[in-house]
Structure formats: structure tokens, C-alpha cells
């Protein structure tokens, strides 16, 4: 299943010399057209390098109200400054864009048949769109580079493009990719892990939802245009019948059992190596991030999981104030038990059965469970793929875009989307009548479902940004678990009057709505190119 990944990574290591970082103004001097770009194999080798830019596991959830690390971070506490030099958030995207542009320019020189050539050019255009969207989310309009540059290229002194210009390029690239890439079925097992046409459509839906809702709630641009694109692209994935929700337990989506084309929920993944004896790359997400408390769930996230009757804990008669740590999970959406460790779960080799989180590491008193694997913990290496786009996200995009476009959503559309996910979590269905009877706002329930289904997968911060609710949610204090006797008295913690752990006080969390909805551009980039203007407030 993963041999194609092994080949991609091994070959890409030898391909590093093909690209230079655009922002460092490195001319392309190491590639010889006379000795490369002669065959499909050459073109595939070049494209393999693009896959190395797919994101690894990280702690981006700590920027939001869903997670907290061992200490404060300068995004959620509002203390960051404009970086003196370009960071990976900026540099790596232009590295990727340059590599994609290089392929788009040189690929036609291979002389391969048009249909085969278009497939590889479509991969390159997908990755160029991927890079530009990562830039757009953070910085808004950025310099558009659509060809490889040299030291004297006039584009190096051009200013930033507008948001709309960047989005026009992204959408054009994704439309080409969706039209020219093979289906997941055509890719089959041998090429599993490569970008399929449904990944291009799903990513287009993600981009369109982001921009459509951001434009709507920040009051600029044409929100309906992008919301309509999100509805259409997500529906195209649904209608393709190439994907479906995983038939097994939700927890197993994030284990080895959920890997490969057999799990049709996988739309796009970052693949890792094969085994301890046959590996190119691995990760230590379980042991290096989760167990060590570098990313722990908050009370706000845990509280968002519904009771099984479909009501939040503030409304449900099923909710009882917990006395033991396991009480938190009683009569709840089963995804809570899949996402957060509880007493009795498999843990680590030196302590095989989990009891309660160590407050030395898990500052909130909760520990994430997704991707947790005791064998990988012992081996200090995991090969579980990272889900980058799941079919569940496609359903969520469709529901939210329909609601935001029309101002309402039908029960039929809820059944096609939200209720399929609720059923998997053992939660009562959502309907317009149910929401009205129980005083629930449909927008809140759609957003809640997204938060729960995609918890720990890096979406929450960007959702707060596009909904323009970061200024409300991020300055709130970070609270943790109820302080149970099971935690012991070794570690002293601050508590609220009702006995919840205070992980970070509100006084240490700030968000400036006039500044923080965009990230600061690197100072050295502005110095190199005065036509680039710093984002407001930075």
C-alpha cells in the first residue's frame, strides 16, 4: 500500500537541487534541460518532490480555543511581532510554488502524449493552488509568481496581488486539476496517495467555503459567488460516488485500519513509511506531541460534544455533573471517547492502561486520543497516515455553504450531511423542528458538528478567522477538566470557583480585530521589495 510513498520520498531526496526558494532570489542554475525532462519517468520524478511539502502533524490547534500546549503561544496570546525574516509559513509555500512552476514550464519538453502530460501538469497546478491558499489564509493578497524567476526578473519588485487575483489563480488551477486528474478508482491501490480529481474538487470546496464565509462575515467581496462554488464542488464530490464515510469505528479512521483506498473516506492523505525495517519517513505525533502535552484538549472543546439526545450539556436532562473522570463521557457523542483518552484506554508500554492525564504534561487535564497507538509509542515511530481531506469534511462544507448561501437548510440536506455524521457518533438527528423546539440556532449546530467531527485536525483556528469570531473566542480563559480527586495533589493548579482547572487566564489572551485577522509579512521581504506593503496594524 505504501510502496509508492517510499519511492516518492526516496526519489524526491535526489530532486532537491531542482528548486530554489523564490523569496531568497536564488536563480535556477543546477538543472540541465539537456539531461532531464526527457520522459514520463523524469516528469513523475519531478512531481514526486511536490508531495514532500504536504504538512506533517503539528500543534496548530493550540492557536485556537480547542487546545493548549505546555505554555502560551504568541498567536493565541496576541504577543507576536512581525518576523524579521521569512519563516516556513511564508518561505516553504514559495518553494512549493516555484517547484510547481518549474514543472509547468519544463514538463511539455518531455514530449509525452498530451493526456499523460496533462495529468502531471494537473498535479503541479493542484500543488501551486495548495501553496497559494496557505499564503492567502495567513497574509491575504501576496505576490503572484506563475513562472520560475531569475535575479533580474521584474516580478521580484512587483507588489502583492489582491485577494481576488490570488483566488482567480487558485480556482483556475483547481478546475484544471479536477478536469485532468484521474479518479481514485483509476489510481487504484498502486497509485494510492497521489492526487485524484476528487481531491481537487474537495480542496476547491474548502477554499471556496473559506473565502465565501470570510467575505460574508468580514463584509467584503462577493460571498455568494464563493459559497455557490463551495456548494457545487462539494456536491460534485458527493455525486462522484468515489467516496463514502468509513464503515468501521470512527477511532480506526486514524489508525492503520483506516488506511488505503479501502477506506473510501480518505480523499487526500500524507503518507508515511511502511515499517520499522522498511521506512523512509515516520512521525512521533503520539509520543512527541500528545503524550508530552504539547497539544491537549480544552474544556471548551470537550463541552461542545453533544449528549446522545442531540442536546448540548447546558440543555440536556441527561447531563450530570461528573464525580469521576469517566463521568465526562457518559451518554455523550461517542466521538468524545474516540478523541480524548479516558480511564481504561490503551496507553503506553510502561503504563498500558490509561487512568488520568498527568497534569505535569497535560495542562488541561485532558489528553487527545486521535492517532494514539501504543505500539508506535513503544517504537518511537509511527507510519499512520495523516488525513488531510476526509469525505466527512466534504459533507460539512456542503451543509455550511448551503446554509450560509440560502439562510436555511432543508431537513433533506441535513440528512445527506450532518445527520450521517451524528449517526456515527450515536447522536440524535438534527432537524429544523428539533432545533426550534429546543431553542437551538441552526448555524451554531452546523458549526458545532464541524468542530467535533474535525477536532484535532487543524481547522478550528481558521474557522474562527473566517467567521470573525476569533475576537470573541480567543480572549476567553482556557479552562481544563474538572479537578477530580484522581489527579492527586502532586501538582498544584489554579481552579475556578466550580472546581475546573484554569490553564490560562483571560488576561494572558488577546486578539486585536484590527490587526490579527491577517498575519504579518516578513520584514526582510518588504525590505527586498518595497512594493509589498505590510498588513494593517503590523
Image (cartoon, rainbow, N blue to C red):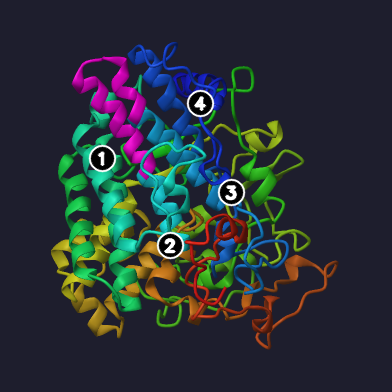
- Asked if residue 261 can be seen in this view, the reply is no
Disc 4/disc 1 C-alpha distance (Å): 29 Å
Instruction: Look at mark 4 in the image and give the residue it sits on.
Output: 18
Assign a secondary structure to mark 2: helix
Q: Residues within 10 Å of mark 2 (few under 14, many from 20)?
A: many
Near-viewer residue (155 or 467): 155
Assign a secondary structure to mark 4: helix
- Residue 334 location (% of width, % of height): 44, 58
Quarter of the rendering occupied by the N terminus: top left
Pointer 2 or 4: first along the chain? 4
Pointer 2 or 1: first along the chain? 1
Q: Mark 2 vs mark 4: give the one in front.
A: 4
Q: Mark 3 vs mark 2: give the one in front.
A: 3
Instruction: Look at mark 1 in the image and give the residue it sits on.
Output: 198
Instruction: Look at mark 2 in the image and give the residue it sits on.
Output: 452
Assign a secondary structure to mark 3: helix
Q: Residues within 10 Å of mark 1 (few under 14, many from 20)?
A: many
Amino acid at each position: 500500500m505504501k510502496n509508492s510513498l517510499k519511492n516518492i520520498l526516496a526519489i524526491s531526496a535526489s530532486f532537491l537541487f531542482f528548486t530554489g526558494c523564490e523569496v531568497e532570489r536564488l536563480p535556477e542554475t543546477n538543472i540541465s534541460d539537456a539531461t532531464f525532462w526527457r520522459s514520463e519517468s523524469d516528469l513523475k520524478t519531478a512531481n514526486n518532490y511536490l508531495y514532500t511539502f504536504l504538512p506533517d502533524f503539528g500543534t496548530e490547534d493550540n492557536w485556537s480555543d480547542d487546545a493548549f500546549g505546555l505554555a502560551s503561544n504568541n498567536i493565541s496570546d496576541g504577543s507576536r511581532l512581525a518576523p524579521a525574516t521569512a519563516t516556513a509559513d511564508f518561505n516553504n509555500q514559495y518553494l512549493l510554488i516555484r517547484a510547481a512552476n518549474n514543472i509547468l514550464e519544463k514538463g511539455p519538453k518531455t514530449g509525452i502524449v498530451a493526456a499523460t502530460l496533462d495529468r502531471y501538469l494537473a498535479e503541479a497546478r493542484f500543488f501551486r493552488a495548495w501553496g497559494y491558499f496557505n499564503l492567502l489564509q495567513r497574509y491575504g493578497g501576496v505576490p503572484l509568481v506563475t513562472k520560475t524567476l531569475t535575479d533580474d526578473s521584474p516580478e521580484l519588485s512587483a507588489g502583492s496581488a489582491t485577494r481576488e487575483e490570488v483566488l482567480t489563480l487558485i480556482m483556475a488551477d483547481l478546475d484544471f486539476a479536477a478536469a485532468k486528474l484521474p479518479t481514485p478508482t483509476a489510481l487504484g491501490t498502486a497509485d494510492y496517495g497521489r492526487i485524484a480529481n476528487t481531491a481537487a474538487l474537495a480542496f476547491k470546496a474548502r477554499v471556496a467555503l473559506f473565502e465565501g464565509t470570510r467575505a460574508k462575515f468580514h463584509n467584503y467581496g462577493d460571498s455568494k459567488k464563493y459559497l455557490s462554488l463551495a456548494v457545487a464542488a462539494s456536491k460534485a464530490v458527493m455525486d462522484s460516488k468515489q467516496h463514502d464515510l468509513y464503515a468501521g469505528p470512527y477511532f480506526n479512521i486514524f489508525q492503520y485500519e483506516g488506511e488505503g483506498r479501502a477506506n473510501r473516506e480518505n480523499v487526500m492523505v500524507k503518507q508515511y513509511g511502511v515499517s520499522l525495517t522498511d521506512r523512509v519517513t515516520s512521525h512521533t505525533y503520539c509520543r512527541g506531541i500528545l503524550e508530552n502535552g504539547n497539544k491537549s484538549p480544552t474544556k471548551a472543546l470537550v463541552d461542545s460534544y453533544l449528549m446522545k439526545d442531540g442536546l448540548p450539556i447546558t440543555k440536556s436532562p441527561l447531563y450530570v455533573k461528573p464525580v469521576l473522570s469517566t463521568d465526562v463521557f457518559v451518554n455523550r457523542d461517542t466521538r468524545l471517547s474516540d478523541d480524548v483518552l479516558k480511564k481504561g484506554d490503551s496507553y503506553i508500554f510502561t503504563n498500558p492502561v490509561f487512568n488520568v492525564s498527568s497534569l505535569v504534561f497535560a495542562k488541561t487535564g485532558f489528553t487527545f486520543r486521535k492517532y494514539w497507538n501504543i505500539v508506535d509509542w513503544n517504537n518511537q515511530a509511527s507510519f499512520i497516515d495523516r488525513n488531510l481531506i476526509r469525505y466527512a469534511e466534504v459533507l460539512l462544507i456542503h451543509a455550511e455553504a448551503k446554509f450560509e448561501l440560502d439562510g436555511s437548510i432543508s431537513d433533506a440536506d441535513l440528512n445527506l450531511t450532518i445527520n450521517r455524521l451524528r449517526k456515527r457518533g450515536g447522536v440524535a438527528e438534527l432537524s429544523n423542528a428539533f432545533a426550534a423546539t429546543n431553542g437551538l440556532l441552526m448555524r451554531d449546530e452546523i458549526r458545532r458538528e464541524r468542530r467535533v467531527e474535525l477536532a484535532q485536525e487543524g481547522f478550528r483556528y481558521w474557522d474562527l478567522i473566517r467567521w470573525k469570531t476569533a475576537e470573541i473566542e480567543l480572549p476567553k480563559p482556557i479552562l481544563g477538566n474538572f479537578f477530580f480527586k484522581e489527579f492527586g495533589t502532586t501538582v498544584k493548579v489554579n481552579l475556578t470557583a466550580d472546581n475546573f482547572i484554569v490553564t490560562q487566564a483571560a488576561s494572558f489572551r488577546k486578539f486585536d480585530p484590527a490587526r490579527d485577522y491577517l498575519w504579518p509579512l516578513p520584514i526582510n521581504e518588504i525590505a527586498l521589495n518595497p512594493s509589498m506593503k505590510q498588513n494593517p496594524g503590523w
